[in-house]
Amino acid sequence: MTAVTTAKTLSELHVKLDPEGFLVDPNEWTPEVAQLIAQEEGIELTDRHWEVINFVRAYYEEHGEPPTLRAITKRGGVPTKELYQLFPKGPAKKVARIAGLGKPRGCI
């Protein structure tokens, strides 16, 4: 069964999202898209957020999938507590969404 996609306009940007709000095509991602998705999540992006986002995108480029929470904390050097402060209530899922990637394995 093919997942249904929806066309969504973020400000004046047109991107395709899956039913959970993840970009269908990671190539549509831009920093502006990240800012708008973060606003939807109630997150104001700081330099530290961008460090995590850039790590997650680089990990995706290397491994072909978004990193799990454990990979972000172990390989990205971000303590779990800080990650939850930066991206509350499901940090791996939220950072993947903001980074323009699919939902990480193991996320509900």
Image (cartoon, rainbow, N blue to C red):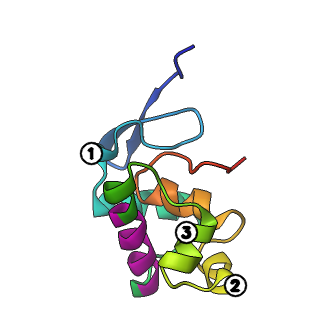
Q: Amino acid at mark 3?
A: Ala
Q: Amino acid at mark 1?
A: Asn
Magenta-tinted stretch: 48-58
Q: Amino acid at mark 2?
A: Lys
Q: Is residue 29 magenta?
A: no
N-terminal of the pair, mark 3 or mark 2, is: 3
- Mark 3 or 2, closer to the camera: 3
Instruction: Give the number of the disc on residue 71.
Output: 3
- Mark 3 or 1, closer to the camera: 3
Horizontally, is 101 left or right of 81 in the view? left
x 53%, y 72%: residue? 72
Real-space CA distance between mark 3 and mark 1, rounded to the nearest whole angstrom:
23 Å
Residue position for label 1 = 27
x 31%, y 61%: residue? 32
x 50%, y 54%: residue? 97
Real-space CA distance between mark 3 and mark 2, rounded to the nearest whole angstrom:
14 Å
Residue 35 visible? The answer is: yes
Are the residues tagged 3 and 2 within 8 Å (C-beta)?
Answer: no
Q: Mainly helix, strand or loop, the magenta region?
A: helix
